[in-house]
Image (cartoon, rainbow, N blue to C red):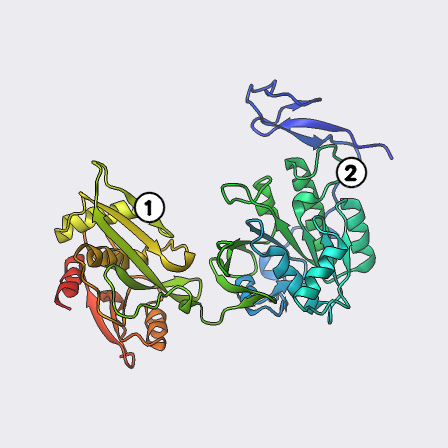
Amino acid sequence: MAKTKTIYSCTECGGQSPKWQGQCPACNAWNTLVETIAESAKPRYQALAASSQVQMLGEVEGAEASRIPTTLGELDRVLGGGLVAGGVVLIGGDPGIGKSTLLLQALAVLSQSLPTLYVSGEESAQQLALRARRLQLPEAHLPVLPEIRLEAILGHLASIKPAIAVIDSIQTVYSETLTSAPGSVAQVRECAAQLTRYAKQRGCAILLVGHVTKEGAIAGPRVLEHIVDTVLYFEGDTGSSFRLVRAIKNRFGAVNEIGVFAMTEKGLKGVSNPSAIFLSHHGAPVPGSCVLVTQEGTRPLLVEIQALVDSSQSPNPRRLSVGLEQNRLAMLLAVLHRHAGISCSDQDVFVNAVGGVKISEPAADLAVLAAIVSSLRSQPLPDKLVMFGEVGLAGEIRPVQRGQERLKEAAKLGFTQAIVPAANQPKQKIPGMEIHPVHRLDEAIRFFRES
């Protein structure tokens, strides 16, 4: 079979060259030429629908997409209720974080009731069998295919007609129509496009495993994340037993949902009460510790914020945060000085979110400042106290979303006091919870001193 003719196109200007060059001959940009297939009279792609006609949006019949539960509750939460027929899910994460283990667990259970296929480009069938037996998974009805050639994979998909297929990983798959190596930009883009077209035409849910770069982004072209329907990131420290699955993009559900798993000898197990992971258990209240009620999607989480303030030995004091935005920490310290009269200009400030969780919402501002003041004055905060609230540059405490749900979650876990923005004060009393509404930062600091 003759190979398809390829050319090299510039990603900046679209100029073409018959061979690779370091510099684009059209716009003189460096390292922008990528391999693509030359256009021919025969179209390479078929339409996803039988015909394309103009329709009035109000006349189009729309129905809620039916879900296929994965039998893993935390994964279903992140996906929005389960897999969707014809949907393509991309899962990225660091090496050894548990991507293959998670998908093998889900597919092994689903294979008992649905036709499935596990395509492995990194492990042999013997390695997959050893892992399945070590995890004590039902393996009798799970077909596996160790293959990296796209044309062969599509052929097996067409013959088996699975409802769910896993491709592990997309960076190992290559197409014969391209001469570049597997994992290159052109190969990843071409293979993902062909697999997505198959999924949409046949109604097969496909899960793609993606490698990540040193910076943590999914390797390959950015268009890979645009092609798929859902993008999940597997986070966590390989030295810790806990893993977080976070949705970055989801066409069939909410984004910013989080699923929490614990890595055990029998695979990944969902954690029903993740707040217990992110709270340290001190024998007595300690300075520099504050409990925050944060919101991840629809789930409220209690996270302990720890701060350490120490005299600086250098003319430029350090400002270091783990799990929180470092630039925001510098801004909060300036607000603390201006509106509460507490200066940390000669102090090193270290802030950490316990458990490795990453907090991006501004509702953590008040808890961060409370932990800093507690450490600076060596004065523990009251026991069973939680707080949340955004701190503005003018020193005001701004409200956050879902305040009622946050307080109910804290009360359920035994907390009895809460400092909240005045606008988040609940209209109805929460049993067992004493609420302290504050309007400005100095009011909250005054409460710390008096308590």
Residue 27, quarter of picture: top right
Left or right of 444 in this view: 221:
right
Q: Residues within 10 Å of mark 2 (few under 14, many from 20)?
A: some
Q: Earlier in the sequence, mark 1 or mark 2?
A: 2
Outermost residue on the right side: it is 1
Structural crowding at the residue carrying mark 1, measured as other residues with C-alpha within 10 Å and reported as few (<14), some (14–19) or many (≥20) = some
Q: Position of residue 92 (x, y in %)?
A: 57, 50
Judge whether residue 388 can be spotted in this image. no
Q: Residue at x 50, y 61 (%)?
A: 241
Total marks shown come to: 2
- Which one is nearer the viewer's eye here, 66 or 277? 277
| Residue 354 seen from this side | yes
Name the spot of residue 217 as percent of width and height, x first. Answer: 52, 44
Question: Which amino acid, mark 2?
Answer: Glu
Q: Front-most of 183 and 420?
A: 183
**439 or 22, which is in the foreground?**
22
- Residue 237, image x, y percentages: 48, 54
Residue beneath the point at 63% across and 56% down: 100
**Disc 1 secondary structure class:** helix
Image quarter hosting the N terminus = top right
Frontmost residue, 124 versus 435: 124
Q: Amino acid at mark 1?
A: Gln
What residue is pinned by disc 1? 326
Q: Which residue is mark 2?
A: 176
